[in-house]
Image: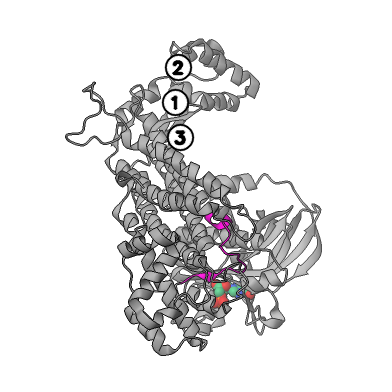
Amino acid sequence: MLERYSLPEMKRLWSPEHRFQKWLELEVLACEAWADLGRIPPEAVREIRERARFDVGRIAEIEAVTRHDVIAFVSCVAENVGDAGKYLHLGLTSYDIVDTALSLLMRDALDIILQAVDGLRLLLADQARQYQDLPMVGRTHGVHAEPISLGLKFALWHAEMGRARERLEQARRMIGVGRLSGAVGTYAHLDPYVENYVCRRVGLIPAKVSTQVLQRDRHADYLAALAVTAGSLEKFATEIRHLQRTEVLEAEEGFAAGQKGSSAMPHKRNPITCERISGLARVLRGNGVAAMENISLWHERDITHSSVERIIIPDSTTLLHYMIVQFTEVLRQLQIYPEHMKQNLARTHGLIFSQRLLLALVAKGLSREEAYALVQRQAHRNWPDGDFLAALKADPAIGQYLPADEIDALCDARHYLDRMDYIFWRAGLGPAPVQYWESMIEVVAAGQGHAQAVAKGELLYEGKAKQMYLTSNPDLVWVSYKDEATAFDGLKKDTISGKGALNNRMAAHFFTLLKAAGIPTHFVRLLSPNEMLVKRVEIIPLEVIVRNIAAGSLSKRLGIEEGQALLQPAVEFCYKNDDLHDPLVTEDQIIALGWADATRLQALRSQALDINEVLRSYLDTKNLILVDFKLEFGTHKGMLILADEISPDTCRFWDRETHEKLDKDRFRRDLGGLIPAYEEVWRRISGE
Ligand code: 5GP
């Protein structure tokens, strides 16, 4: 690796001394394993441990004669160990050591890279937040499209580096294997115990099957992950290079005091670091291809891969680390020019607002084709020269629908940033847009009123808290909330007048909130104080419980004090079966029993966590803590949606200050005052 593109941590990692140190560690561990098996005397292992060392110069001397690096290494170590040296490398083939050590080095290299990725992500998150509302033009095909914000670009990069992290971690698992299986992978002169002992001691998993080597699809996968990450960095760097073009000049790489851009042109300030990053990404892609060439070794191995790997693995890890660190610095020093962004937004005299104008005309009653033609005519007439907005305002065909002041109001870049809060929340970069959802609740509720009339049919099912009826529409079910309260799988029972209506109202409110936040549920509309219309679903026989704070059965089962906050929301699954008391079931068991496959489980988990995020942040603004809750899901026309109810019957709500229980625990624990508690929740969420 070229000195100029190496940073100290990686240089040390790939140094000959460090590699030999790993080899030594593995050789000694193999001796320990043999001692466990009684094949080497324990005193000999002690002697080996104490005296084993190497000298890089001496290894080179021996290698000049043997032309074999591992033999040279073992001979050098044996020279230092003395008599016990004869036990070194017992039953091993060179690649038992070389390949296992390579896995260790590759794993450790990734740890250095992952740390750099984390640093870059932190900075991207900061920059995204800082420029969340700074408008600039968005470009597709390099041509002005519609306004975006600079922060959105950074948020996108932040998410992309999150995926890079996942990909690199996956590569870390793929390479986290070792092998000591002998010359052709048969353990003919080795005991699998040795492999297991050595690998487990250094944190690797023994490969299930190997030849003389670990199979190179693993290494190719690793280098592909590096190359894809480099590709992302190249994209970011290319973006900055474009933004730094003289004609654009919305951002510029920092220019250090004393720096010079050109030997001939004193004015030059060039995006050289970004260009270097773009260039090096090409090397990583090339190395990725070379790693793929290495997959098809002959028979139980040939050595064509070895020379290639001596170059590409240290080089790619070193380069990627360097690129991430360099790009982080570029971002830290980046000069931003908001004035130029503003000028560029105005450069097309309003063309970038064409879609909004088109939609406004459609809203006024024109067909889409008519509106499109009107806007396009002026757009083309005034391109590349001319004033689109002025022409639009002077066009009587448009003026009869959109007066000039409306056109001006529509052509506001800030409108395009309205959903930034939502995107930033989804990207984990900002708080939940609760105010926006709240403002949408009424809009959504109004839309729900438009649903078709249906007639109530036969009773379909009666549960503890609800009755479900068929309707004249086979896709819809009529739900009637009962006043019954039950606990402990129906052992404790009571009728509490007014509970059904309260739960019906609250469930409708929460379902509407979720819809406003973009999450589909089975709720269609309210029918009466204690009835609602829902989509008919095929119910999945699982309760999905999400917990934010320890309480209830979790506290009881694990002896954890109620009220202890969990470090992150915890999802658990229970099998819906009253006779068995809805027992807890693991994800593996769910898959093994065929109740849901891994993909569906992942979908359940992610939907439940999304719902938790919405409810939790919403309730927080109502001074309520969402302690935990239970969800049920079903499929409607093949789509997974939230079913059942969300209410104080299925959630634990505590007052934020007093931790007073405002949910069904009042009934379960004989605390009394259930209706006033439910009314209090309703009062807070509805503002009534
Ligand atoms: P836990 O497992 O602590 O008893 O309950 C966790 C959360 O899920 C609580 O908010 C509780 O109300 C809800 N939950 C769990 N199982 C059921 C159930 O069978 N019916 C209802 N209504 N809620 C449940």
Residue 20 magenta-highlighted: no
Q: Overall secondary structure of the magenta stretch? A: loop
Q: Of label 3 and label 2, which has the lower sequence position?
A: 2
Instruction: Tell whether 254 sits left or right of 532.
Output: left
Residue drawn at point x = 59 percent, y = 52 percent: 295
Q: Amino acid at mark 3?
A: Tyr
* Separation (CA) of disc 3 from disc 2: 18 Å
Q: Which residue is mark 2?
A: 389
Estimate the spatial distance between the alpha carbons at disc 2 and disc 1, rounded to whole Å. Answer: 9 Å
User: Which of the pair 77/553 is nearer the observer?
Assistant: 77
The residue indicated by pointer 1 is: 411
Q: Residues within 10 Å of mark 3 (few under 14, many from 20)?
A: some
Q: Which residues are magenta?
A: 203-219
The reply to whether the residue tagged 1 has its Cβ within 8 angstroms of ligand 1 is no
Mark 3 secondary-structure assignment: helix
* Applied colour scheme: one colour
Amino acid type assigned to the residue bearing label 1 in the image: Cys
Q: Is residue 210 magenta?
A: yes
